[in-house]
Amino acid sequence: MHKFTLSLLALFCVTMSLHADDLGEIAKKYWFHWRGDKMVTKASIKGKITDAQRKRYEFIMKCIKEFAPHWLDEMASVDKAMGWAPGTFADKCIFGVDYKVTPVPAPHECTSWIIMPDLTGGKNLILHKNRDSSSKYLTAQIRRVKGKYSWLGHGNYGAIGTNCGINSKGLAVAMNSGDRGNENNVQGLDTTLLARILLEECADAPSAVKLLEKMIMAGAYQHGQSGSIWFIADVKNAYVIEHNAKHFHAKKVERGIALRGNAWQYPEMFAYTTQPPKDLVGNVRREFAVRKALIHETYQKGKAITPADVAHAARIKEFPEDKDCYPLCGPMTNTAATFVIDQEFPEDLSYVSFAFGPPRCTFFIPVPATIDELPDELCNGTTGNEIFKRFKKRHWKKNWKEESELQAVEAKLNANFAKALDSARAVLKANKADAKKEAAAILKKAFQENWQTAAEAAKVDSRNWFDKLFDL
């Protein structure tokens, strides 16, 4: 047995067993890059900000008090746990980290889509997101705040918001940047913070859409020069929302597939865009590639669309006939997530297939939405750090292995997880005592087995297996 495999078996003895309602303890355990004075913010609430910045700070704190007041306790807990002066973490959340001292990511640009049950054989509803960003410290997130819905997601190192996630009711949320325009806010909460609020407060998609509109119309939204596009889904309902700081349009997805790059498609939003035509072409080209892979080459050939098909679409890395168009998986595509909402037991059997790195270079690993612990390196940024130390933009067209080899490993992971889903489903149908707890334990065990399978497939010893994937 490989040396790394032995260490992997011991990994789950030291995984995330902390109650997530104490963010200070999480920060102390996982945000070790910022211990002491290593985290420097762009501004300080102690008199080193301009009047405009102070007004922005005060407004954002007002938004937090209105929509997520428990974050104030979280921020104070982080300051105390990390030994920072009171207000430091709030400062970081509002103004960001000084990029000259601690690198921070550029705004993300993504491609996402929703696949309704009529295309999946009635088994599930799928929401997928390919994330494009310069972020290099990426972490898996489990949050369990008292009195709120718990959630599983993926976000930036040290962030209290999330780039995408699914909560304990089976509600999934993701977002893209939308068109550039002139109706923007320079203050308010960014989309990752709004996403967390939706996951913690809402049990279903309709209520999430209503809350999102309420926050937008209250001015509690800022997103630089661009508007946004949201994908919100539960077991019965799915919506695509397009908006800027003043105009909001949500439409329900009734059937089929709904997909977006970074361009609005609703006529109601066309009057507010300043997006140049060349950007529209690139976005439409990515969307066409998804339709071709999932509709023309899969569904129209008599096959139900599966998460494996979604993974294939997420890995499209070039358009030979349109070389100037950014592909589905390009040099800035750093992660992907496929949310699979079970149609029978959405709270217990829904899961996320995460690619903890560019999907063309790594495996999609199924993670149950009920998981209560994850490997430390997924929660503390180590994985992202090791990946991106080896990821060179000039080599982005190279694969660690051919896609067929990645798919072969994923076939094993998916088969093992499908078997666990069947076992967990049988337990839930039997309605036995502690059925939910037993089902969650079955899926957790499958995830642990799959993590070991992925490590062994990389054929490495003491090195983290993600290192090998990006040692190009």
Image (spheres, helix red, strand yellow):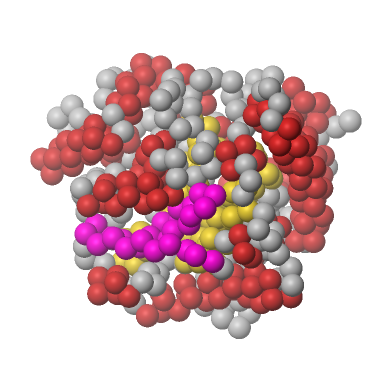
Image quadrant in which you'd find residue 249 = bottom left
Q: Is residue 62 above or below residue 147?
A: below
Image quadrant in which you'd find residue 270 = bottom left
Name the residue nearer the viewer: 322 or 287.
Answer: 287
Residue 459 appearing in the image: yes
Q: Which residues are magenta?
A: 229-255
Q: Is residue 418 magenta?
A: no
**Residue 59 coordinates in the image, percent (x, y):** 18, 39
Q: Please name the residue shown 29% across and 72% down the image.
A: 268
In the image, taking residue 170 as reference, residue 232 lies left or right, namely: left
**Residue 209 coordinates in the image, percent (x, y):** 36, 51
In the image, taking residue 407 as reference, residue 162 lies left or right, namely: left
Q: Is residue 37 above or below residue 162?
A: above
Q: Is residue 237 magenta?
A: yes
Name, please, the residue furthest toward the bottom: 321
Number of marks? 0
Q: Please name the residue shown 41% across and 76% down the image.
A: 280
**Residue 326 coordinates in the image, percent (x, y):** 52, 70
In the image, taking residue 242 as reference, residue 187 lies left or right, namely: left
Q: Please name the residue shown 41% across and 40% down the image.
A: 202
Image quadrant in which you'd find residue 359 = bottom right
Name the residue nearer the viewer: 305 or 428.
Answer: 428
Quadrant of the snapshot with the C terminus:
bottom right
Q: Is residue 216 above or below residue 167?
A: below
**Residue 399 coordinates in the image, percent (x, y):** 71, 59
Name, please, the residue furthest toward the right: 1
Q: Is residue 69 above or below residue 334?
A: above
Q: Please name the residue shown 80% across and 42% down the image.
A: 419
Quadrant of the snapshot with the N terminus:
top right
Residue 222 appearing in the image: no
